[in-house]
Image (cartoon, coloured by chain):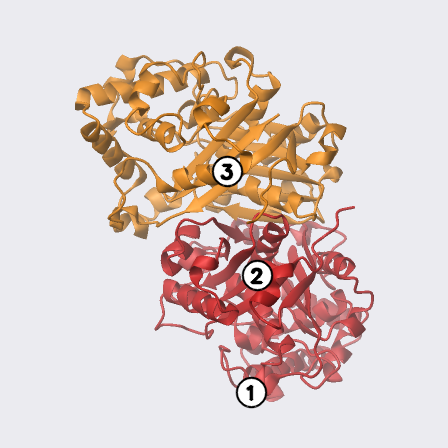
Chain colours: A red, B orange
C-alpha cells in the first residue's frame, strides 16, 4: 500500500490575476502577473524555483507553446518545465504532479502555474473547426449537464420550475460571493428572477446556470513541508489528493445514471483516505468545487459527501453552502462568477482556499477554517481531481 | 540539495507497435497494442496498474482526447491518468513524471505510454492552418537545423560537400540499424549516394537527412525499485534523469551559436550528476539520441559529452557510433529510420535501451551493455530530456 503524500508538501505562495475578458493583457502578461505574485507571496526570487508545472488546456488558445511559453514569460530558463493537460482538471492535476515531484526528492521548491486566454476567439474544438469528434458521437458540455439536471429533478421529485429555482439559488450564492471578490470575472449580484428569466442555453440550464468563458492565470509556490516555515509562518499543507479518470463516453456507459460523477466520488475517496478525513461534512471547513453549471455544484455536494444523494437541492436551499453556512462552497464566486480559464481554474481554487485558511479573504472571509477542499471535474465528467489542504 | 531518483524506480515491462504509416490501426488500436505488450512483458494484468502517464503531443492528430483516450482504449477505468506534453520531449517527460510519482510514495506500479497518429493528415500547425506564430517570427524545424549544419561546416573547416558527406554517414548508419529492426518505419539500408542525391528540404539538409512523419505507440511499466524482481529477474533501473527548458525563440538569443543545444547539455548534466556518471564516453554503453535531422545526431554526440565540440563529424566517420563501435548510437535506427511519432519516441527509446540491456535486440544486439542513455530534444531545440538507465 503506497504511503501517499500527506504532510510532505506545503504551499508557501499563491498568486492570481484578475479573471475576465483581459483584453489589456497578453497570455504572457497573465503568466508573468500570476507568477510574480506567487513569488512575492512566498518571499522568494524567481531563481529559487527549481522546476515548474504548467497547467494549460489550450496554450494561448492554440497559438502558443506550453513549457517554453512559461520559460519565456517569466525568464525561467534552464529549469525543467512540464505541461500537464487534463481537460477541466488541468490545474489541479498540474498541482498533483508538482506535489509528487517534491515528495519524490527531486526538488525542494517548485512552481505550478495555470493560464488560459479563451476570449480572443472561440475554442478550437467547439466552434472554429466544428464539433469535436467526441461531441459528434455524444454530448456537448451543456448537453450532458442539462440532462443531468432533468434527471435530478425527475429522480428527486422536483417539478421543472421547482428544480430551476434550486439551480438559481446556486447562481445567486456564487454571484453574491463573486461580488465580494476583487479578482472575479463577474463582480455583481444577481436575483433569482434574473437567473430564471435568462436566455435558455440547454434546457433546463439558462445563461446564468452556465459558467463563463474567461481569461486568467493563477500560480502557487510549493515546497518540501519540512522547509515551509523558512518561507512563511503560515504554510498550508497538502493533506490528500486524488485523480480519477473514467470513460470519455459516459453516455455509452449503462451504469452512468447522470446523478453524479464516478470520477468525483473516486477522486474524493482517495483524497479523503490519504488525508484521514472520515466525515467530510464535519472535517472540511470550506470547498471550492467545479460549478461549470449550477446543477454540477449540487451534484458535487453529494459526490463529495457533504450530504447524501438527493439532499443537494436542500443543501443549497437551506443556505448550508453560503458564506454563513456550515460548509461554505465557492466562497470565491466559483467558476460561475470568478470565471473558468480552464488550466488556471484548479490553481485559483488553491489560491482561494489558501487565502481563506490564512484569514486574508476580506469581505468573503469565513470563520475558523482549518481544512479546505478543491475539486475539478472535466472530460465532461470523465476526469476529476480532489485535494484536501490544511494547516 | 534534493536527493534525486537514482535506483528508486525500475522498468519491468516494455512494449512497442511497429512504427510507420499504420493505416490498418486506429490511434486507439496502437495504444492497446503497446499497452498490452508492456503488461505481458511485465507479466501483469492491466488491473495491477495504479496510475498512468500519457505522452501525447497532438492526441490523435487533434481529433482525440488525451487521458480519457488512454482510459477508453485500455479499459483503464478508475485510476489517475495524466497527459504530459513537452514538444518532441513529450515521451521522456511523461516517463520522468511517472518516475517521480512512484518515487514519491503515491504508487507502486504505473504505466507510461506515448502515442501519435501523424500520417492521416498533416500536423495542424505546420500545414493545415499555416505556420505556427513562433515559426512566423522565426524558423521551422528544418530551418533551424539547416542553419546549424551550415554553421557547423563553417566553424569546423568542412566544405559543403565534405559536410554533407558526414551528415550522410549518420543516415547510412541509422538506416543500416533500422534495417535490422522489425518494428522500424524504414527497414531498408541506404547508400551515401542515395542520401546525397535526395531532394533538398532545407539546404544543406536533403530528404534523407530528415526523420519521417510516423504513426506509432510505445509503453513501459515502471515500479518501485525494491519490488522490481517480483516481476522480472532483469529489471532496468533509472539511474539519472534531467529535463531542461530554454527560450522558445533561440534565434533571438545572442548567446545561441547553433553549435549545439544548451537544453541537451543542461539536461545531461543533471542526469549524469544523479547517476554518478563522470565520463559518459566511457560509462555509457549505448545511446538512443534525438536524430530529428542528421546534423542533430552529430551535435548530440558533442552536447552529451561523447566527444568534444567539433569532434562529432569524426565520431561518425570513424564508426564509433555504429553497432560495432565503442559507443553505439541509435541501434534502433533512430528517429531517422525507426520513425518519430512524437509522444511515443522517447518511450520507444526506453524500449530499445531496455531491449539491448536485456540482450534481446537480435541482429542489432550490441555486446556487454550495462548502462544506456535516452535523449529527446524539442521546441525546436528549447527542451531536452536525458535519462540514464542501467542494470
Q: Please report the residue visible at 25 percent of the width from the left and 33 percent of the height from the top.
A: B146
Are there few (<14), some (14-19), or many (20+) residues within 10 Å of tag 3? Answer: some
Relative placement, left or right, of A73 versus B282 is left
Chain designation of label 2: A
Q: Nearer the viewer, residue B330 or A316?
A: B330
| Residues behind callouts 2 and 3 on a single chain | no
Are there few (<14), some (14-19), or many (20+) residues within 10 Å of tag 1? Answer: some
Distance between the alpha carbons at the discs numbered 2 and 3:
24 Å
Q: Please report the residue visible at 34 percent of the width from the left and 39 percent of the height from the top.
A: B261
- Residue A63 seen in render: no
Q: Earlier in the sequence, mark 2 or mark 1?
A: 1
| Residues behind callouts 3 and 1 on a single chain | no
Q: Which SS class for mark 1?
A: loop
Residue marked by disc 1: A189
Indicate the quadrant where residue A362 lies: bottom right
What x and y, as percent, mark residue A382?
65, 55
What x and y, as percent, mark residue B187?
44, 17
Distance between the alpha carbons at the discs numbered 2 and 1:
34 Å
Q: Which SS class for mark 2?
A: strand
Mark number displayed over residue B273: 3
Distance between the alpha carbons at the discs numbered 3 and 1:
57 Å
Q: How many marks?
A: 3
A264 shown above or below B162:
below
What x and y, as percent, mark residue B253?
27, 49
Residue marked by disc 2: A222
Relative placement, left or right, of A25 versus B82 is left
A358 shown above or below B145:
below
Indicate the quadrant where residue A271 lies: bottom right
Q: Which SS class for mark 3?
A: helix
Amino acid at each position: 500500500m503506497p504511503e501517499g503524500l500527506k504532510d510532505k508538501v506545503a504551499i508557501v505562495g499563491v498568486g492570481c490575476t484578475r479573471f475576465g475578458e483581459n483584453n489589456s493583457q497578453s497570455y504572457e502578461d497573465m503568466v508573468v502577473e500570476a507568477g510574480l505574485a506567487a513569488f512575492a507571496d512566498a518571499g522568494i526570487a524567481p531563481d529559487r524555483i527549481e522546476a515548474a508545472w504548467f497547467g494549460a488546456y489550450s496554450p494561448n488558445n492554440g497559438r502558443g507553446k506550453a513549457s517554453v511559453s512559461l520559460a519565456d514569460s517569466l525568464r525561467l530558463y534552464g529549469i525543467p518545465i512540464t505541461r500537464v493537460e487534463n481537460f477541466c482538471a488541468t490545474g489541479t492535476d498540474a498541482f498533483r504532479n508538482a506535489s509528487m515531484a517534491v515528495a519524490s526528492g527531486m526538488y525542494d521548491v517548485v512552481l505550478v502555474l495555470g493560464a488560459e486566454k479563451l476570449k480572443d476567439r472561440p475554442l478550437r474544438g467547439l466552434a472554429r473547426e466544428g464539433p469535436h469528434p467526441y461531441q459528434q458521437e455524444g454530448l456537448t458540455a451543456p448537453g450532458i449537464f442539462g440532462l443531468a439536471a432533468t434527471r435530478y429533478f425527475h429522480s428527486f421529485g422536483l417539478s421543472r420550475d421547482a428544480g430551476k429555482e434550486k439551480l438559481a439559488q446556486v447562481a445567486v450564492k456564487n454571484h453574491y460571493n463573486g461580488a465580494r471578490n476583487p479578482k472575479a470575472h463577474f463582480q455583481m449580484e444577481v436575483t433569482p428572477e434574473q437567473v430564471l428569466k435568462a436566455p435558455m442555453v440547454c434546457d433546463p440550464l439558462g445563461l446564468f446556470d452556465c459558467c463563463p468563458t474567461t481569461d486568467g492565470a493563477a500560480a502557487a509556490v510549493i515546497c518540501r513541508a519540512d522547509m515551509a516555515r523558512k518561507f512563511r509562518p503560515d504554510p498550508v499543507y497538502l493533506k490528500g489528493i486524488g485523480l480519477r479518470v473514467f470513460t470519455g463516453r459516459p453516455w455509452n456507459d449503462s451504469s452512468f445514471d447522470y446523478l453524479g460523477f464516478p470520477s468525483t466520488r473516486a477522486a474524493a475517496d482517495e483524497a479523503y483516505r490519504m488525508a484521514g478525513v472520515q466525515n467530510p461534512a464535519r472535517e472540511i471547513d470550506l470547498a471550492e468545487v467545479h460549478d461549470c453549471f449550477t446543477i454540477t455544484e449540487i451534484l458535487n455536494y453529494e459526490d463529495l459527501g457533504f450530504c447524501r444523494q438527493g439532499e443537494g437541492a436542500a443543501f443549497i436551499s437551506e443556505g448550508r453552502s453560503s458564506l454563513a453556512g456550515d460548509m461554505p462552497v465557492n466562497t470565491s464566486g466559483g467558476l460561475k462568477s470568478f470565471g473558468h480559464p480552464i488550466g488556471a481554474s484548479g490553481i485559483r481554487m488553491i489560491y482561494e482556499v489558501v487565502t481563506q485558511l490564512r484569514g486574508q479573504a476580506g469581505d468573503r472571509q469565513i470563520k475558523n477554517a482549518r481544512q479546505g477542499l478543491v475539486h475539478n471535474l472535466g472530460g465532461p465528467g470523465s476526469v476529476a481531481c480532489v485535494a484536501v489542504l490544511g494547516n
